[in-house]
Image (cartoon, rainbow, N blue to C red):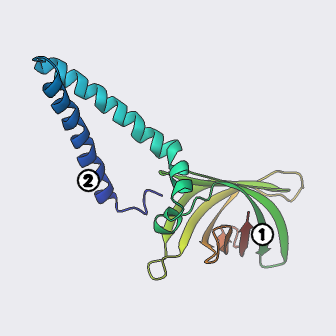
Amino acid sequence: MISILPITRVVGIVAVWYAACVAAVVALIWQFADHPSLLSSIGIAFSGATVLNALLLFVIYIGWKKIWSIFPGLNRLVFPDLNGLWNMNIHWQNAEKSGFVTAKAQIKQDLLRVSMEVFSRDSDSETLIALPKRDPESGRPILYYVYRVVPKNIKIDAGSSYEGSAILKLSNASYDRLSGNYFTSRQGTGHFELSR
């Protein structure tokens, strides 16, 4: 998700906020302490910087979900929270035949990364790359998803693992539906439909 944000602006805002907090701590020390030494002021400023680092790490990995729940407009402004278990319908076809499979998809997301694991009766898949973006024209959220499918070898003709790629778009009506076409390195194509 961080790739959706204007990263230079974010870094600039965090750096200014960080410097302002450290400067405020040093100013308070000089204002209320009785002739503090420069070394003790620097030590206190670095202690404050450590607390700010811990706060930033908390927001990046855990706290962002709470922020998104308090300010639901961030789903529209930045990117929707896709975390959770999704029901998945996979429509597939290759040169000889076509079919339909149901599966479960587990999406894990924080401010730095997104991953999606898919579990079906005959195979599991793992994320190679998942990249959230917005359509440059409509602003619609899109998830570019590159994955590896690993057959469970419960059938004689299960075959070896293979890679695939999909472009999944979120529904305009709600953020509870993802769908898009895919293709695989086995020359297969199809369509994913996810709902939660």
Q: Earlier in the sequence, mark 2 or mark 1?
A: 2
**Where is 29 relative to 92, above or below?**
above
Is any atom of residue 175 visible in this view? yes
Kindly identify which numbered label has been placed on residue 12: 2
Asked if the residues shown at circle 2 and circle 1 are in contact, with their CB atoms under 8 angstroms apart, the answer is no
Residue closer to the observer: 1 or 117: 1
Residue closer to the observer: 17 or 101: 17
Q: Residues within 10 Å of mark 2 (few under 14, many from 20)?
A: few
Q: Quadrant of residue 166?
A: bottom right
Amino acid at dot 2: Gly
Q: Residue at x 53, y 43 (%)?
A: 62
Q: Residue at x 39, y 61 (%)?
A: 5
The residue positioned farthest toward the front in the image shown: 32
Disc 2/disc 1 C-alpha distance (Å): 43 Å
Q: Quadrant of residue 18?
A: top left
Which residue, given by chain and number where applicable, does mark 1 sit on? Answer: 90
In the picture, measured across the screen, residue 61 lies left or right of residue 188, that is left
Q: Position of residue 47 (x, y in %)?
A: 30, 25
Amino acid at dot 1: Ile
Q: Nearer the viewer, mark 2 or mark 1?
A: 2
Label 1 SS: strand
Dividing the image into 4 quarters, which one contains the C terminus? bottom right
Q: Position of residue 159 (x, y in %)?
A: 79, 58
The residue positioned farthest toward the bottom in the image shown: 137
Q: Residues within 10 Å of mark 1 (few under 14, many from 20)?
A: some
Kindly identify which numbered label has been placed on residue 166: none
Q: Position of residue 100 (x, y in %)?
A: 84, 72
Residue closer to the observer: 11 or 59: 59
Q: Residue at x 47, y 39 (%)?
A: 58
In the picture, measured across the screen, residue 80 lies left or right of residue 112, that is right
Q: Residue at x 23, y 48 (%)?
A: 16
